[in-house]
Image (spheres, rainbow, N blue to C red):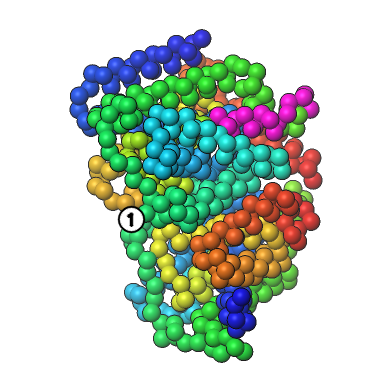
Amino acid sequence: MRDVRSILLFGVLVAGAAALLQSGVALTFIMMSLYAVLLAQSWNILGGYGGQLSFGHALFFGVGAYAQAIAQLTWGWNPWLALPFAIAVGVAVGLIVGALTFRSGLRGSYFALVTLAFAEVFRIVAVSVPFTGGGVGLMVPLHASVANLQFGSRRGYVFLLLGFVLAALVFTAWLRHSRFGAYLQAVRDNENAARAIGVDPVRIKLGAIAWSAAFMAAAGACYVQMFQYIDSGIAFGSTISVEALVGVIVGGAGTLWGPVLGAAVLYGLGEATRNMFGEVPGISMVIYGAVLVLIVMFMPRGLTGAGLSVRRMLKGAQPQSAQQPPAQQQDDRKEEARV
Amino acid sequence: MFDPAILFTALLNGLTTGAVYALIALGLTLIYGVLHIINFAHGAALMVALYAVYLLHERLGIDPYVALPFVMAGMFAFGYLLQRSVINRAGHGKDENILLVTLGISIVLENLALVLFHSDTRNIDTPYALATVQIGPAMLALPKLIAFGGALVVAALLFAIMRFTDLGRAIRAVAREKHGAKLMGIDVDKVYAMSFGIGMACVGAAACFLLPAYYVNPQVGGGFVLIAFTIVVLGGMGSFAGALLGGLLIGVVESLGGLWFGDSLGQMGVFAIFIVVLLVRPQGLFGARV
């Protein structure tokens, strides 16, 4: 229950800040941070707790965004109605991709590459077919009203995103304490062992990809409502996939608060570089990439993992470095067994 | 249906592009076969090499074909140092970490190029850029023909190194049985770095053959990275002959696909092959072991 309390506290703090702050800059900062956190939390479900590294998570973001835009523009739906539809489409695509890849037993690096290829295929399709607006993209007309899921100020979007972030956090907290979550982590740590004790890895991973895709599609739908525009490069391009993944790795994969911390830190870093160097295209991504390399090299368990081991060291308990050699040995043994 | 002459031209074009693809894929499959890692930064490395060729031509007036040995040597050093200083230290015993670190490297390289050169697409002007050769009913651009021949020569050179030199024997030994090779006194870490360097040198050669008939921009690597992976998966991870045949095949598929469905959908055909092969036959068409 500590998790629930901390999630509530987080929600109250952010909501309070959003209600009290008047400056547009501060609200934009909160909005974009929450958006980055939502991307990261979504990736964390499949990549952090499930151990399935997706390099093409933009796939689910993109289908969510296009579903949201097309339902409004082509079919004239109310955006509030389009939102659950967009999420459902995201889940459906997640289940299809998951069924194809998990059933054929693709793991690790292969899974990463195949998700990337799926995102590329969708990008090319989105450029080539007429109902996505082709290369021009889709523009949602601006009619700011709550009934239209468009808000006059950033504050409304902050609350919308906060709702999804809290839902993702609650789901992640549930993962940590539920049977499904235990199965998922068992599959991540050792798929064969999990299968041996009667866990069906394909079904468990399908559950994880469906939830992950749901939150990603929600983020895509929110993007369309916030910026009233989507094109194939934004929807299925690598930027979104990278943003989702780097936040998690930096903060700590498979933790509740790591992705929140990582995404916020990265967004802050990006803003700081933009302030320092001006609007030079690419500069913030250079920082993202460099941070990713450094974190994987020196803090493979992310900021929260590094924080934990520092705390343990201060307490005089086993430092993290003492825990690593056994894992290394195990890996060597595994390799020998294969030979 | 199309005129046979057009089909023949498309086929030849596909083969010439495919030879360069094969060269890029050879580098990737060598790195995979020896280090058992997937080098996600392969496309970004190609982009770096293309800019190197571009700058050598624009600033110093060096012809891309003259630049070949220098670019190859430079890329070898780049790969050797990158493996020794970054990639080797990032694994912590998990393949996923290598994938993430090479992804990070590719993000840094691509966006550094974006900062330095902006997103403009550039190409170079050589006296032979528009020269053509008549082959049967088809007209083929001279740079493409040189690329075809050159790629095959470099590939043959690589085969020879792997087959007949001590370095090649050491590399094959490490690829087959890391611990055994170590016991025989082979410096495994050095072989890793050499293999990575050679893989990058292949990319450097590919860049020299590509640029006279192609272009460079910061995103250019992205398209190649998936194509190279497709080839490597198709040919069987770690298989040299597979990479060569796979490269030619993918070049032809892309060219003929482009003829029937237009260029962007032709490329989609390549990715579709990638997904289908991974799902149905992950050991590849020619590979026996996974």
In reply to whether residue A201 is colored magenta, the answer given is: yes
Q: Residue at x 47, y 47 (%)?
A: A236
Q: Quadrant of residue B118?
A: bottom left
Q: Which residue is mark 1?
A: B115
* Pointer 1 local density, CA inside 10 Å: few below 14, some 14–19, many at least 20: some
Q: Residue at x 54, y 52 (%)?
A: A121
Q: Quadrant of residue B147?
A: bottom right
In the image, taking residue A115 as reference, residue A160 lies left or right, namely left
In the image, taking residue A312 as reference, residue A202 lies left or right, namely right
Q: Which residues are magenta?
A: A196-212
SS majority, magenta = helix
In the image, taking residue A263 as reference, residue A94 lies left or right, namely right
Where does the image place residue A75, in percent across and percent down from the top left? 42, 40
Where does the image place residue B64, in percent across and percent down from the top left? 46, 77
Between B3 and A174, the one lying in front of the other is B3
Above or below, A208 relative to A138: above
Q: Residue at x 56, y 48 (%)?
A: A118
Identity of the amino acid at label 1?
Answer: Val
Between A212 and B231, the one lying in front of the other is A212
Where does the image place residue A156, in percent across and percent down from the top left? 30, 26
Give SS at disc 1.
Answer: helix
In the image, taking residue A74 as reference, residue B253 lies left or right, namely right
Above or below, A115 relative to A25: below
Between B214 and B101, the one lying in front of the other is B214
In reply to whether residue B5 is colored magenta, the answer given is: no
Above or below, B236 relative to A293: below
Residue B275 appears in the figure: yes
